[in-house]
Image (spheres, grey):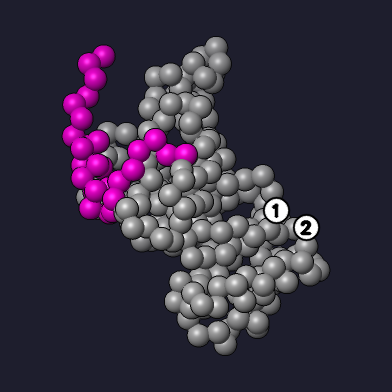
Amino acid sequence: MRDALRRLASRATVAVVSGRAREKIREFVDLGDLYYAGSHGFDIDGPGGLRHAVAQHTLPLLAEARQALEGKLGAVEGCALEDNRFSVSVHWRKCAPRRDAIERVVDDVLASPPFAGALRKSEGKCVFELRPDVAWDKGSAVLYLLDMLRARDQAGGADAPESWYRGVLPVYVGDDTTDEDAFRALSRYDAVSVLVAPKAEAERPRLTHATHTLRDVDDVLAFLDALASIPPVAS
């Protein structure tokens, strides 16, 4: 998969968007010259020294919320807390029968000072996540990157941002419920949005804003290879 991403990045701009912390994703993918949007797009970096972070003032609150959750959920077997810097993830896949009880704990923490009104809960595949309560998500991050690339490539030469997008085909591949934010945001640009979900998918709803579906990571690999193999368009 890394080789496929490397080949594709030699032909097109590639960004990795994840709920996990940006540093974790960068270390895991281990490819330079890509854009990385971690913590659901709250923390972005990329070539040319790009750095963009949203709601940094909430970092101390998120750390405090993680400590509070550890105190209440640390003894629940199978429940795992993950610090993703701009978000706190509460994974319940390995203790599914306790899901409702875990959600009540998360809700209680969010309703208490100083978290009430500053943090909010979202849901992914077998996970509850606490994020800053601001209008930002994976869709916002993808649109930010597209607009930044437009400005970089055209330096305002287009009459309007939309005119630049007519010559660009965004392609977004994701398997989580939080990727729906990006599918929805990109729909106005006639993007190819791909939900990765087998027919027997039980961890997320099948209803989607995506335009296409793939079954699994093997399909994704074949898709990336195919994209990387498209002959260049003659200028």
Query: Is residue 222 inside the magenta stretch?
Result: yes
Residue type at mark 1? Asp
Cα distance in 3D space between marks 2 and 1? 7 Å
Residue 130: quarter of image: bottom right
**118, 157: nearer the viewer:** 118
User: What residue did someone put label 1 on?
Assistant: 133
Q: Earlier in the sequence, mark 2 or mark 1?
A: 2
Query: Is residue 55 inside the magenta stretch?
Result: no
Tell me residue 135's x, y (percent).
67, 44
- At mark 2, the secondary structure is loop
Span highlighted in magenta in the image: 209-235
- At mark 1, the secondary structure is loop
> Does residue 50 sit above or below 86 in this rendering?
above
Residue type at mark 2? Gly
User: What residue did someone put label 2 on?
Assistant: 117
**44, 195: nearer the viewer:** 195
**127, 34: nearer the viewer:** 127
Tell me residue 227's x, y (percent).
25, 36
Circle count: 2
Question: Outermost residue toward the right?
Answer: 113
Tag 2 near tag 1, CB within 8 Å: yes
Tell me residue 55's x, y (percent).
67, 52
Circle 1 packing at 10 Å, graded few (<14), some (14-19), many (20+), is some
Q: Is residue 47 visible?
A: no
